[in-house]
Amino acid sequence: MLRSLTLIVALLALAISGANASEVILKTDGNGNGRTISFETEGPWLLAWRVNSNFRSQSGFELNLINADTGFFDSRILLMRGRGGNGLKLFENRGRFQFEVVSNFADWYLTVEQLTEEEAEAYRATAN
């Protein structure tokens, strides 16, 4: 468990630092509800997210992926309550998307990076 957590923290630091050849295609933040601007991806892409709140019992955060061409719901990415957290999620699909955010008493930060296939390999699950 500690090894997995260490790997996740290292990968998050790498993604946020821009130490690789990936291209940031969306960087946004806020503290309310709504939809982000649309963005277009060409294959594997990485979402780095962070949520902060000072209101443990009252805060909540929901993040959904929306198909920007149709405006329809694609998938739920995250649903959480409490003080917050952070993480990474690798997506393989290409297209035009936007995020729908529902945020109660929480500040949120989202970064989307276009990855090469080689970069995406670092984030894919492997069998032990």
Image: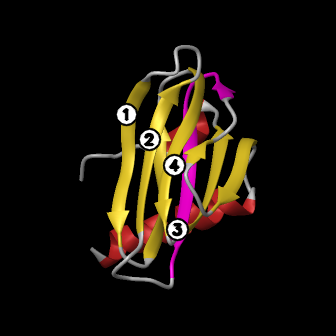
Name the residue located 35 percent from the left edge and 63 percent from the top edge. Answer: 80
Please determine whether, in this image, residue 72 is positioned above or below residue 99: above
The disc at residue 51 is 3
Q: Which residue is mark 1?
A: 75
Q: Which residue is mark 4?
A: 101
Q: Are marks 4 and 2 in contact (CB under 8 Å)?
A: yes
Please determine whether, in this image, residue 79 is positioned above or below residue 59: above
**Helix, strand or loop for disc 3:** strand
Name the residue located 45 percent from the left edge and 21 percent from the top edge. Answer: 72
**Helix, strand or loop for disc 2:** strand
Within 10 Å of the Cα at label 1, are there few (<14), some (14-19), or many (20+) other Cα atoms? Answer: few
| Among numbered discs 1 and 4, the one appearing first in the sequence | 1
| Among numbered discs 2 and 1, the one appearing first in the sequence | 2
Q: Which residue is mark 2?
A: 64
Closer to the camera in the image, 2 or 57: 57
The disc at residue 43 is none
Q: Amino acid at mark 1?
A: Ser
Mark 1 to mark 3 CA distance (whole Å): 19 Å
